[in-house]
Image (cartoon, rainbow, N blue to C red):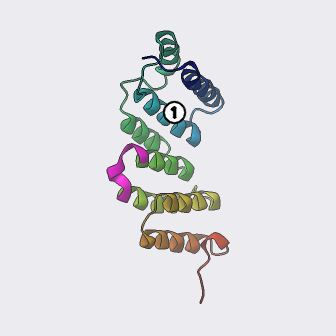
Amino acid sequence: MQCPKLYSEKYLLALRCLLAARSIDSSNPTTHEQTVRYRRALNSIPEPLNAKLSEVIESEFSPILSKDADLSQYNSDYRSKHHNSAAHVQVGISTRYFLEPKTHEDNHKDILRTLALDSASLNDAIRGLKLLNAWKAEQRIRDDYIAAAHARWPEASAFAKNET
């Protein structure tokens, strides 16, 4: 059975958006995450796309990230390439979070380590805390993160210590 036309067209529209974003900044953290998510989605379509659409999508997208690519390795390479950028590292960790469920504990620790990067900004720190909250990290992990962020940005209300 072939995917309904509207369902299939969403993959083509998503590809167009992704290609446009990559043409602006292929190393942008959000673009990286969406590239991996798109390949993963393509690789796990429950019903095949029609042959012509599939051929178009693969011809445009395979040069970026092939069907047979190891998504975890692609993500690891991205993190290594951008190891000095807190925003890039955080997205690499977030991407690893959904690719490799068994790495959750490492992801929590690695998000904490991004606070020590020279490039880490207050916005990066807030984004890291939001990730830990979204991942439902243990309160101890979140408390450690907040304490480290508070030490670096003591005036930031996002990391203010509760005084009772």
Residue 60 versus residue 143 in the image, above or below: above
Q: Nearer the viewer, residue 140 or 8?
A: 8
Count neighbours of disc 1 (C-alpha within 10 A) and say few if under 14, some if 14 to 19, many if 20 or more. many
**Which residue is rendered at x = 55% and y = 25% of the image?**
7
Residue 18: image location, x then y, percent: 59, 29
Q: Main secondary structure of the magenta part?
A: helix
Outermost residue on the top side: it is: 52
Residue 96: image location, x then y, percent: 41, 46
Outermost residue on the bottom side: it is: 164
**Magenta segment: does it hold 100?**
yes
Q: Nearer the viewer, residue 164 or 115?
A: 164
**Magenta segment: does it hold 102?**
yes
158 lies left or right of 91: right
SS class, disc 1: helix
Residue 19: image location, x then y, percent: 60, 25
Q: Nearer the viewer, residue 76 or 66?
A: 66
**Which residue is rendered at x = 49% and y = 49% of the image?**
89
Which residue is the site of mark 1? Answer: 35
Q: Quadrant of the C terminus?
A: bottom right
Residue 72: image location, x then y, percent: 37, 39
| Residue range highlighted in magenta | 98-105
Q: Quadrant of the N terminus?
A: top left
Q: Amino acid at mark 1?
A: Thr
Residue 122 versus residue 59 in the image, above or below: below
Total number of numbered labels?
1
Residue 161 versus residue 100 in the image, above or below: below
**Which residue is rendered at x = 58% and y = 32% of the image?**
26
Q: Nearer the viewer, residue 40 or 160?
A: 40
**Which residue is rendered at x = 48% and y = 12% of the image?**
55
- Res 16 → quadrant: top right
